[in-house]
Amino acid sequence: MDADLLQRFNPEDFYRHFLADGLRPDGRGLRQQRSAELQRHALGSALGSASLRLGRSSVLCGVRGELEELGRIEVSVELPPLCSALFREKHRALGQMSFLSKTLTEVLNLPSVFDPKQLLCHGDVSWVLHVHIVCLNYDGNAFDLCLLAAIAALEDAELPALVKGTLGPEAGERLAIAPANAEDVVSEARRLVLLARPLPVTFARMPGGQWVLDPCAVEESLGASVSLCFLEGRWLVFHQGGGADANRFLEELMPVARTSTEKLTKLFEN
Amino acid sequence: MAARRDGRAANQLRPPQMELRPLLRADGSARFRFGDTAVVCAVFGPREPRFRHRELFDRASLEVVVRPRIGIPGPKERQMEALLARQLEHVILANQYPRTQISVIVQLSCCDGAVSACAGNAAFLALLDAGVAMKATAMCVALAVKLEPEPVIWLDPTEAEEAQCDALISLSVDGSRNQLVSNVSSGAFLDAATWASCIEAAGKSCKVLEAFMRMSLQKRLETFLKPG
C-alpha cells in the first residue's frame, strides 16, 4: 500500500513499522524533542509577549494588565478552528481550552511560582495580568507550548509607571499610565519576577506500549498522554486516556523528563 | 494526624451506593453515590449519529455531556466532559460499533466533593447497563493531599475537606490489569513518595469499589432470574 494512504487510514500500523526501529516518522528518536524556537517581545502593544514554536506547533502569547483590587494572573487559552481541523467542533475545543486555562492559571498563581505582592501599585489597587494565549498552528503538545509561552511572556512583561489621573470627575482617585519623564509617579515601572519556572514535559503512549516525548498531533490521537509539570523536584501529573502500568510508568519516564527540563531551562537562558 | 470531621479514617471511602436503571427511557442508566455526592448518568446508543460529520468510519464516536446541578454548564463542566471522554475512550471497545454514536449524559444531582470520581463511576455503570462492550473495569476515586504540618492523604474528600487541602487528585484505575486509566491533579506540586502512596491508596480502594460493584450486580441478577 502507498505510505500516505497507510498513514491516513491506519496510523497505528504505520507507526508500528517505525517504532520497531526506534524511530518516528518525522525522523526523531523516541525520546527526542522537536526543536523549540522562542521569540520574546513579539507584540509591541502588550505589556509582555512571546511567540513559541515547537516543530510545526506555534502559539502567540500576550500579557495585558488591568487595575483591580486583588492582584493575580489569569490565563486564557484559545484553540481556534484556524489552528487545526481537530477543533472545528467547538465542543471539543472548549474542553481542551478550559482545561488548559484552568490548569495554567492555577500553576502560575502558586505562591512558590509567583509573588502577587509585586503587583500592588497604590493603596489596595493592584495589577491583574491577563495572559492571552492563541494557538496559531496546532501539531500536538498544547500543554508544554502554552505553559512555556506564558512563562516567557510573563518574564518579558514590564509594568508601566502610574500617576494620579487628571481627566474626568473622579480624576484624583483614578490612576493613569505615566507619560515619559513624569515626576509624581505613585507606582514605579518595574519588571515582573517569577520565583521559579514550572517546566512541563509531555509524553504520549504508542500502540506498542512505548512512551514518546513531545508528541505531535497524530501521536496524541493514538492513545494516552501524560503531561508532567516540574517545580523544584516535585511535580503535578495530568494523565489521560489510560493504559499505563500503575507503578512503573513514572519511574521509567522520570529520567527522560529530567533531561528534557534541563534543555528547556537552556531555552530560556539564551 | 488530623482527624476528619465525619470521623472516617484517612483511607476510608464514604459508603458507596449504586442503582441501575433509574431512568427507563434511556438505553442504559445508573445512579452512583458517595455519601452526599450523587450523580445520575444516562447512555443512549450505539445509535446513528445526529450529525453526519460526527460519524467515524471505523469506530463509534463518543459524546459526553455533563450538566451541573443548577444553572448552565460552565468551564468546569466542559473540563469534566473532556476528562470523562478520554477515560471512557480507553474502556469502550469503540471499533465494534463503526459509524455509530454513543452519548453519555451525566447529571450532577448532589455535590459534596469527589464529584468527578462519582461521575466516572456512574458513567461506567450506565454503559454497563446499556450493554456497550468494554475491555476493562475502570473505577474512579478522588484523593485530597494536605502537606502541612505533615503530608496526609484523605481518600474521597467532602467539599469542606477539598477546600482545606493543598492538592486534589482524581484517579481512575483498571484494577484487574493494575493499570492507571487517568490521573489528573491540581493544586500544590507533590514529591515522589507522596505520589507513590497516592497511587497505592487509589489502587486499593478501586479494588474495593470493584468488589462492591460485582456483589451488587450479582444480587440484582439473582432477583432478575428468580422465577415468580
Image (spheres, grey):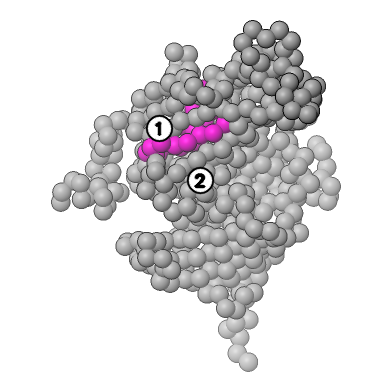
Residue depicted at 49% across the width and 54% down the height: A91
- Foreground pick, A75 / B106: A75
- CA gap between label 1 and label 2 equals 16 Å
Rendered image: mark on residue A152: none
Q: Residue furthest left?
A: A1
**Circle 1: residue type:** Ser
How many numbered marks appear?
A: 2
Residue depicted at 62% across the width and 52% down the height: B74
Rendered image: mark on residue A96: 2
| Residue at which label 1 appears | A58
Q: Is residue A53 above or below residue B118?
A: above
Q: Between disc 1 and disc 2, whose residue precedes? A: 1
Residue A1, percent from left and from top = 15, 51
- Foreground pick, A229 / A172: A172
Single out the mark in the foreground, 1 or 2. Answer: 1
Chain name for mark 2: A
Side (left or right) of A203 relative to B156:
left
Q: Residues within 10 Å of mark 1 (few under 14, many from 20)?
A: many
